[in-house]
């Protein structure tokens, strides 16, 4: 029988996989993970701000990647330093097709690196790892919802 730590680990990793990669029936519909959603967005759509004071989808993706990188350093107990949370929102706007591909690839690479780290952990008794993993799940799910809502407006 699995102990509570193992159950938590398995369930969290499955929820992260559903959020980023593919449907498991936990909370998303088929075909609506973050990567699946982003694959259907053109650079033109990714460049459009949603409303007068909202960011582009490209900025959303850049922000999620940035957040993952910060949390990865926190989970690994590396120095985070001063963080300018607003920089991406101020600077990422229109993107070319190549830049859009690059933003999505950076997100995938960052997620895969973190996922490999989480799968390789011998135990799940470190509060930084648990808190960071949960923050990644919740924060990314929030932005996936933002992106999906934005698509309703853009399309």
Image (spheres, rainbow, N blue to C red):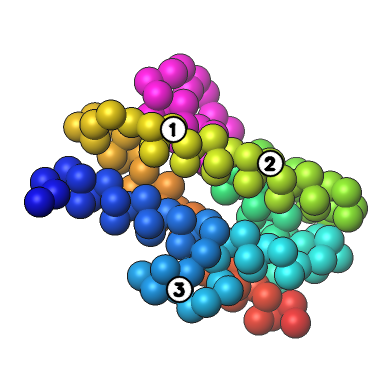
> In the structure shown, which secondary structural element does the residue marked by tag 3 occupy?
loop
Question: Would residue 65 appear left or right of 93 to someone viewing this image?
Answer: left
Tell me the SS state at disc 2. helix
| Circle nearer the viewer, 3 or 1 | 1
Of labels 2 and 3, earlier in sequence is 3
Left or right for 94, reference 34: right
Image coordinates of residue 8 in percent, x first then y, are 22, 50
Q: Name the residue under label 3.
A: 28
Asked if residue 146 can be seen in this view, the reply is no
Is 143 located above or below residue 76 in the figure? Answer: below
Callout 2 crowding tier (Cα within 10 Å): few <14, some 14–19, many ≥20 = some
Task: Say which of 53 and 9 sits in front.
Answer: 9
Is 124 displayed left or right of 39 in the figure? left
Q: Label 1 crowding class (10 Å Cα cut-off): few <14, some 14-19, many 20+?
A: few
Residue assigned mark 1? 117
Residue shown at 74%/77% (left/top)? 154
Q: Percent x, y for residue 140?
A: 49, 55
Residue underneath mark 2: 106
Is 139 one of the magenta-colored residues? Answer: no
* Spot occupied by residue 93 in the image (x, y as percentages of width and height): 79, 53
Span of residues in magenta: 67-85
- Mark 3: few/some/many CA within 10 Å (<14, 14-19, 20+): some
Q: Is residue 8 in view?
A: yes
Marks 1 and 2, how far apart in space?
17 Å
Instruction: Depth check: give the residue in front, 28 or 60.
Output: 28
């Amino acid at each position: 029988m699995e102990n509570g730590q193992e159950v938590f680990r398995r369930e969290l990793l499955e929820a992260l996989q559903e959020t980023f990669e593919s449907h498991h029936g936990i909370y998303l519909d088929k075909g609506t993970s973050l990567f699946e959603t982003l694959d259907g967005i053109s650079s033109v759509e990714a460049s459009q701000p949603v409303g007068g004071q909202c960011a582009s989808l490209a900025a959303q993706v850049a922000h999620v990647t940035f957040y993952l990188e910060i949390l990865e350093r926190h989970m690994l107990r590396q120095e985070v330093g001063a963080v300018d949370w607003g920089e991406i929102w101020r600077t990422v706007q229109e993107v070319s097709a190549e830049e859009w591909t690059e933003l999505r690839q950076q997100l995938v690479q960052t997620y895969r690196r973190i996922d490999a780290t989480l799968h390789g952990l011998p135990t799940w008794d470190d509060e930084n790892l648990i808190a960071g993993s949960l923050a990644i799940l919740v924060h990314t799910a929030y932005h996936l919802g933002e992106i999906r809502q934005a698509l309703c407006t853009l399309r």
